[in-house]
Structure formats: C-alpha cells, structure tokens
Amino acid sequence: MKSIQIIGKEKDEAKILTAFQKKKGKEIGSDARDIQFYVNNQKALGLVLNRKKILGYAMYPALAIAIQFAIGQKYAFPDGRPACTTPDDNVEVCGLRDLLQEGVSTLRVLVAFILGGFVVRVVSVWQTRRTAYLSLCGGAREMIIRVAGMLPSTSDPESINNRETMIRWIILGFELSVLKARDSIDSHEGRMYLKYLGLLKGNEWEKMVDGDRHTTVWSWMMAKTTKLNKDGVLTDIYAQSLCDSIADIRGRANDLMSRLNRDQPVPYSSTVGTLINLQLIITSVWKGVVWSVWSFNKEGNSWGKPMQVIDLVIFFINVIALGILYDLSQILYNPFGPRVIDLPHKAVGGGIRKFGKELTSCDFPSTVTGDAHETLSISDKHELEYLDELIEGEDEEIKSSLHFDQIPFSNGENYVSSLYPSFLRPKNLVPSISKKFSTVPKKFRT
C-alpha cells in the first residue's frame, strides 16, 4: 500500500511538472531544488485555492446573475428605456440601486478595517507557534550538549547506559511535545511512531501520564539527575545546571499550540466571518440590480458587451480575495501538520536525533580528550606555507584575487544556488571563486 501511495504521489508531481513545462515552453532543470520548488508551490496554492473553494465562492456571482435576470424585465421598469438616466424615472429600481451602493460602501470600509486586523493577528499567531517550535529545537540541542558534556565519557556499561537513557529521553520529550501539538500524544499511532524511532523502552508508555506524557519524561530526567548526583556521578553544580535546563525545556515544550492564550476568540472570528458574508451578499444584490439596469437598457444583450464581463470578473476576484483572507485563519491554524506549508519536522527531528546519537558515542576530537599531538599534518604545513607566501606578497595576483568574505565557499555560485531554484537565481550575484583560484598553485587547490 505504501509503494502504491508513493507511485501515486510521483505521478501527481509529474503532472504538475509537465503542465508547467507546457505553460512555460521550456524544460525544467534536473536540479532537485527546482522540482521541489514547483511541486511545493502547486501544493501550497491548492491549500489556498482549490476547485471546491472556487465553487463555494461562485455562489455570490451566481446570486448576482440570478437577480439580474429576475429584475431586468419590463415589469420592473414601468417608465421604459433608458432607465435610471433621470431622478424621476423608474424610481423603485434606481432608488434600490443607489441605496444598496451606499450600504456596500459603508460595509466595505468596516470589513477592510476589521479583516485587516484579523489577518495580522492570524499570521502573528502562526509565527508565534513556529517560533515556539524553533525554541524547543534549540532547547533540545542545548540539553543534549549539557548531558554529553557533563556525564562521564567513560566506556563502562553504566556510564554508557546513563548517557543513552538521558539523551533518548530528551528526544522522546521533544517528539511527544510535537505529538501533543498534533493532538496525537495519547494515540496508538503516536505510540507506534515513537516505537519506530526507537525512543520507547520497557513499560515507559504505560507509566506516562495521559495528556502530559512529555511532562512525565521531564520528571523522569529530573529524578535521574538527582539519583546520579546522590551516586556521585554528577557534582552538585552539574546536577543543578541539568535541573535548570530540564525546567527550561519543560516550559518551552509545555504546549506548542497553546490554545488557551493564542487561539482567536470564537465570537471575534464569527463576527468577522458574518461581516464578510453580509458584505458579499449585499454586494451581490447590488451588482444584480446594476446589471439588471444594464440588461434592460441593452434589451437583454448586456452580456455581449465587455463591460458586463469585466465587471463580473472583477466582482468574482473581490469575492475570492475576501474568502481567501478569511480562510487563512483555518489554513494557518496548526503549523505542525504534514502539509507543504507546515514545519519540516521530519527533517528537523531527524537532525536532532542524529545529533543526539553521535554525541552519545563520546567520539570527541583529540583536542577535547587531551590526546592532541603538537606535530602538524602535511595539509596544515601546506596551508601555513601558502599563507606565508600571501603575507610576504610574493604573489600579488593570488593575494588580490582572494577576498575574506568569499573564502568560506568553494564556489560562490553554490551558495546562491542553495538559496534559490535555478530560475530565481540572480545572475552574477556572487562572483565565481573557482575562476579566481585558477592562479593558485595546484598543490594548494582543494
């Protein structure tokens, strides 16, 4: 079943790329960033505007057209043609048109003011939740560093077990915090996910408190730290430092969604939605009356004129714009899901797990363990000789070709390409350093 889903996904992505090629009339590069950029753009657009939403928005122009055909008849214009050219002819329909126009103008200002503040609040909460996730990631890495640096790095089984358990609990608490944001902290799927990652051991799942499983893990870490301090494994200062760090990460991981203080008030959201619907309904009725006047004056041939079609398109765009802006409150509500616009937890979590696993092995460099030798390697000698050559000015061409702000990159174009897909990369934004290094002696080239 999984392979079938993957194949289906690849077919969908292939369709997107093929459509783009036909539209642009050119081939897409083989760069993986290009492909991912196109696919992600299409998926993100589908979240904001899809067929179902367009059909929902279309009911307002449909209402306006229905009113046009209902009113644009002779019975509604007893004074004949042309209608609404003087204040005294066809007073009922023309007066209704003017009255609706005044109401639309009033509501338009009110809706623009309220909807603007609503959207700002929605985006702000979305950014706050993503920032909370970023803070949690930083806290998890900091905890891993503290545990790896403070616990003994000896190779005896007990020390290894202490390090592995503490670091595993850090990652377990981190993953449970994200599962809570996804409303899956107590679910069977969440448990299977943690088992798949190898983060659950023994009866740990059964011993966790429902709804507060991540907090339970932090309490285990606090108890373990206290035990290590009593056993003489950790000094009082180290134990206090770890306890402070545990308390800090508990605060960061408490509730990433934090619905109590970050969710929009329901009456506020309902009021904004109601005002938008009223605005669209009144605008639809007004447009229908205006179009009925046009239709009557043109003897039913108003649709053959560009003005009617263009006005319909503009009205429909206005409906879509208001609908999309309000729907942002739903689209941006939870950034912890699997969508393209959501947080890349799979990649970020994988990086943190890898970081913890590597530090568990205590594979420190010789400069940390005290086994460093004073002798220089051959590469170190070559680098020092080359720097001496530059400082002494023996090769001014080489010296002038190097710029300190470019040295960290083997090729400036690689840095630019890491930020943008190929079709968005600025031309010659960063000069190619590979050309500048063409004068460097071969023995010093990397």
Image (cartoon, helix red, strand yellow):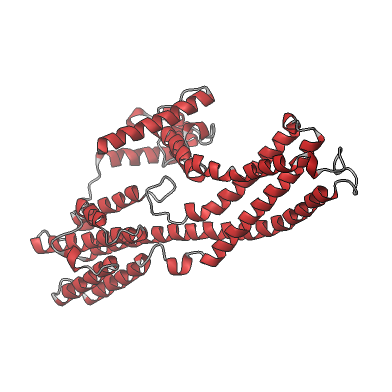
> Residue 443, image x and y in percent?
32, 30
Is residue 382 visible from the viewing direction of this image? Answer: yes
**Front position in the image: 215 or 29:** 215
Q: Residue at horizontal 45%, vertical 37%?
A: 37
Q: Is residue 165 above or below residue 410?
A: below
Q: Hey, which quadrant is residue 302 in on the image?
A: top right
Image side of residue 3 versus residue 300, left or right: left
Quadrant where the C terminus is found in the figure: top left
The N terminus lies in quadrant:
top left
Q: Position of residue 128 (x, y in %)?
A: 47, 61
Relative depth, front residue between 87 and 130: 87
User: In the depicted view, which residue is nearer to us: 156 or 190?
Assistant: 190
Instruction: Give the residue at the far front of this rendering.
Output: 75
Tell me which residue sits at (20%, 51%) in the image.
196
Q: Is residue 396 above or below residue 90?
A: above
Q: Is residue 206 left or right of residue 65?
A: left
Q: How many marks?
A: 0
Q: Is residue 392 visible to the viewer in this orientation of the structure?
A: no
Q: Position of residue 241 (x, y in %)?
A: 29, 72
Residue farthest left in this picture: 157
Q: Quadrant of residue 244?
A: bottom left
Residue 277 falls in image quadrant:
bottom right
Q: Is residue 396 above or below residue 91?
A: above
Horizontally, residue 306 falls left or right of residue 235, namely right
